[in-house]
Image (cartoon, rainbow, N blue to C red):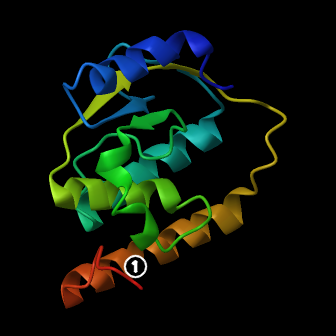
């Protein structure tokens, strides 16, 4: 619960109202308040630069865990996501973007849990491998294609 439950209503409102098929929290946009150490802040912002430049991502924060989607928006996409670890968020949002699904980003308050057991080096390496795989699939024209 790095983001409090008070973010739930603003997250769900665009989806429930039909304004958007999805809604995601963004720790980096104006109106957000993020508390975390310098190391995680630098790594997060660096990853966002890589994601935006290499993958051409138009969304601001892939790895804020706060997300909500209309079931229909994801029913065809979820089986196509290859990653089952931390890169899952980025891969799914890139597929959503490629499909032209409307997603609203909302500012969130975020406080890093100092007890987090996320091992940063393996996570970073996994994300970089995921970025390379997505770029290779985009180049080959197979990104987001059905794997069945």
Q: Position of residue 50 (x, y in %)?
A: 36, 60
Q: In the picture, residue 103 is in which quadrant?
A: top left
In the image, residue 68 sits, relative to residue 31, either above or below, namely: below
Quadrant into which the N terminus falls: top right
Taking depth in this image into account, of 49 and 92 the one nearest to the observer is: 92
Residue at (21% x, 26% y) in the render: 18
Kindly tell me whether residue 146 is visible in this rendering. yes
- Which residue was labeled with disc 1? 132
Q: Would you say 7 lies left or right of 39 here?
A: left
Q: Position of residue 98 (x, y in %)?
A: 19, 61
Q: Would you say 41 lies left or right of 119 here?
A: left
Quadrant into which the C terminus falls: bottom left
Q: In the picture, residue 91 is in which quadrant?
A: bottom left
In the image, residue 54 sits, relative to residue 72, either above or below, namely: below
In the image, residue 136 sits, relative to residue 109, either above or below, namely: below
Q: In the picture, residue 114 is in which quadrant?
A: top right
Q: Secondary structure at mark 1?
A: helix
């Amino acid at each position: 619960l790095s983001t409090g439950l008070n973010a739930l209503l603003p997250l769900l409102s665009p989806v429930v109202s039909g304004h958007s098929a999805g809604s995601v929290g963004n720790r980096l946009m104006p109106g957000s308040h993020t508390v975390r150490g310098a190391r995680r802040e630098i790594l997060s912002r660096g990853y966002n630069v890589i994601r935006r430049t290499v993958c051409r991502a138009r969304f601001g924060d892939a790895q804020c865990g706060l997300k909500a989607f209309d079931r229909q928006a994801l029913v065809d996409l979820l089986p196509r996501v290859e990653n089952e670890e931390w890169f899952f968020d980025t891969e799914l949002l890139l597929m959503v973007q490629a499909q032209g699904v409307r997603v609203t980003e909302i500012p969130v308050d975020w406080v890093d849990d100092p007890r987090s057991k996320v091992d940063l080096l393996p996570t970073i390496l996994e994300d970089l491998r995921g970025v390379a795989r997505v770029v290779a699939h985009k180049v080959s024209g197979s990104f987001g294609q059905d794997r069945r």
